[in-house]
Image: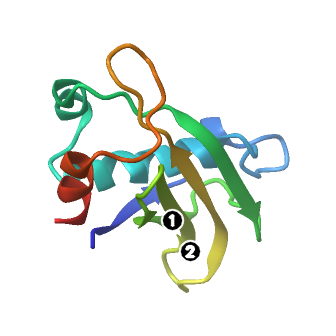
């Protein structure tokens, strides 16, 4: 099972006047880790397109435990949790120094065929790639 960790330092353009990261940017951080997770499986965007399937996000969730601040060094973790009827990826954002969990969440991605029709199960060809 793949698990990735992406080091990241919070940039100035992601914080508000209180020096705290705007809540919507957490999903951008999840996306950084999700991209690396799929790359670790050799299933990046071009391979997804070649597979003949599309993977739209159908649900996202984030729980904010503590605010992220400008200049803070964090580690964004991602791993596959479920892949039967959709692909569920779990995330955690940790302080790079202490390891304390600052936020966590998930995304669910459906699988659609080339015509955009929703599939009721993740194809075996896809599960073989993400579980290898």
Sort mark 2 into few (<14), some (14-19) or many (20+) by Cα contacts within 10 Å. Answer: some
Question: What residue lies at 64% left-to-right and 66% top-to-bottom?
Answer: 104
Q: How many marks?
A: 2
Q: Is residue 125 left or right of residue 117?
A: left
Which residue does the numbered mark 1 point to in the structure image? 73
- Residue 92 picture location, percent across and down: 55, 68
Q: Which mark is residue 92?
A: none
In the image shown, does 106 or 14 lie closer to the viewer? 106
CA gap, disc 1 and disc 2: 6 Å
Question: What residue lies at 83% left-to-right and 41% top-to-bottom?
Answer: 17
- Residue 70 picture location, percent across and down: 64, 53
- Residue 105 picture location, percent across and down: 63, 61
Which residue does the numbered mark 2 point to in the structure image? 95
SS of the residue at dot 1? Answer: strand
User: What coloring was used for the rendering?
Assistant: rainbow
Q: Is residue 82 left or right of residue 50?
A: right
SS of the residue at dot 2? Answer: strand
- State whether residue 43 appears in this view: yes
| Relative vertical location of residue 99 with respect to residue 71 in this rendering, above or below | below
Q: Is residue 55 left or right of residue 65?
A: left
Q: Is residue 80 left or right of residue 52?
A: right
Q: Indicate which disc, 1 or 2, sits on the residue closer to the N terminus.
A: 1
Instruction: Pick the quarter of the image with the C terminus.
Output: bottom left
Task: Tell me whether circle 1 and circle 2 mark residues in contact (CB < 8 Å).
Answer: yes
- Residue 129 picture location, percent across and down: 18, 54
Sort mark 1 into few (<14), some (14-19) or many (20+) by Cα contacts within 10 Å. Answer: some
Question: What residue lies at 77% left-to-right and 71% top-to-bottom?
Answer: 65
């Amino acid at each position: 099972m793949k698990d990735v960790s992406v080091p990241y330092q919070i940039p100035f353009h992601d914080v508000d006047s209180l020096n705290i990261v705007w809540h919507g940017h957490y999903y951008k951080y999840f996306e950084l880790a999700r991209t690396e997770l799929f790359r670790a499986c050799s299933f990046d965007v071009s391979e997804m397109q070649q597979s003949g399937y599309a993977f739209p996000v159908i649900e996202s969730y984030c729980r904010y435990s503590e605010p992220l601040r400008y200049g803070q060094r964090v580690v964004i973790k991602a791993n596959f949790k479920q892949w039967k009827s959709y692909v569920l990826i779990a995330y955690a954002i940790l302080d790079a120094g202490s390891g304390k969990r600052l936020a966590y969440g998930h995304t669910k991605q459906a699988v659609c065929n080339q015509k955009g029709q929703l599939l009721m199960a993740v194809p075996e060809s896809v599960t073989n790639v993400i579980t290898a």
